[in-house]
Image (spheres, grey):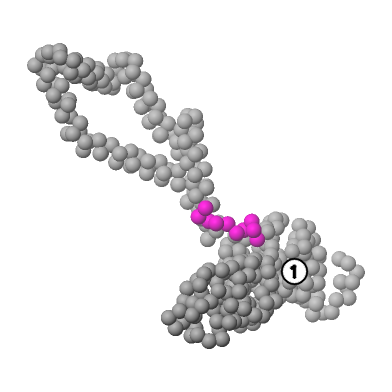
Amino acid sequence: MSLHTHHLPAWKREQVDGIKQRFADYPVVGLVNMHGIPATQLQDIRQNLREVAEVKMARKTLTRLALDEIGGDVVEMGEHISGQSALIFSKENPFKLYKHLELTKTKMAAKPGEVAPEDIVVPKGPTSFKPGPIVGELQQAGVPAMIEAGKVKIRETKTVVKKGEVIDAKMAGVLAKLEIKPMEVGLILQAAFQDGTIFAPESLAIDESAYLNKVTLAAQQAFNLSVNAAILTPLTAETIVGKAAQDARNLAVEACIYEKDVADLIVGRAYREMLAIAMKASEGGFELDESITQAVAAASAAPAAAEPAAEEAPAEEEAEEEKKEEEEESGMAGLGALFG
């Protein structure tokens, strides 16, 4: 503790101690920027976060002092203090906290001098304005406007302010009249601290669907690798054994190894090959025995009659595939709980 902290006024000492106590009470602490949030909206945000987090406003110097007195890894949080910072304390994990804070954000009209957070685009199409001075205002602001069917119309979609550019008074007025609200207002997470780790907001901004899709793909690939490499696990053992049995049957048929489980398959294959040769011979003008002729005729008609059976096979394959997917996904049931 530095010497000057001994001489803090009582109210400042109380605030510093309050911050330190909350660090002990809550597993997750974040820094948020509250710049530009109207008082009424801030009250609503606090109300919405009441069951999730506690927002504590304090002077930057007192926040840094509290961080220094706590010491350790948390001191680095001070590097993320900027703007109108406040502390937020929560028992949710940083990913869920970030998600909750994103939900507090609302769109507001731009004020002169503010910086565009993204490209501001005016879409083409009719407006609700009647012909008048508004046409000139739009054109002076760089918005291509015209009069059509008694209404003011934007002739083409145009980017009027690029990301990072300052919005001047004229443009702010035009955007307000067009009811374009480019400014996102809410608690902006600057950093979050948990168990000695400081999380930057970009590491918490996860596209959950894309992330879960990648994890699912990785699980499927791991499953396939395990099956193809014959690595037995509780999830893949049944599939590996089934694949081995099928491979063994195929080998026995190809090598004509007469076992009770494959004898019928070998004979059936030989019979089909015999019929194929007989059909070729018949086409070449050779005369066949009556029994062979009847068998060839039956074989020729068989594909049409066998179509329903052929349609049943994919259904069985789909059932087997669904079973595999259920097995692969069973180990990931709790993944979504991380993000809420």
Q: Nearer the viewer, residue 329 or 121?
A: 121
State yes or no: residue 318 in magenta. Answer: no
- Residue at the right extreme, as displayed: 3
Give the residue drawn at x 36%, y 27%.
246
Occupied quadrant, residue 15: bottom right
Residue 257 in the image: state x and y as whole percent: 32, 15
Q: Is residue 180 visible?
A: yes
Q: Amino acid at mark 1?
A: Ser
Main secondary structure along the magenta-highlighted residues: helix
Q: In the rendered structure, which segment of residues is drawn in magenta?
A: 201-210
Residue 109 in the image: state x and y as whole percent: 60, 78
Q: Answer with left or right where residue 116 lies relative to residue 73.
A: left
Q: Residues within 10 Å of mark 1 (few under 14, many from 20)?
A: some
Occupied quadrant, residue 311: top left
Q: Nearer the viewer, residue 153 or 326?
A: 153
- Residue at the bottom extreme, as displayed: 132
Give the residue drawn at x 59%, y 82%.
137
Q: Answer with left or right where residue 322 lies relative to residue 91.
A: left
Give the residue drawn at x 17%, y 34%.
305
Q: Nearer the viewer, residue 310 or 19?
A: 310
Where disc 1 sits, the SS reads loop
Residue 88 in the image: state x and y as whole percent: 66, 69
Instruction: Locate the N terminus and report the quarter of the image it occupies.
Output: bottom right
Residue 78 in the image: state x and y as whole percent: 77, 64
Q: Is residue 271 visible?
A: no
Per the image, the residue denoted by label 1 is: 82
- Is 293 situated above or below 214? above
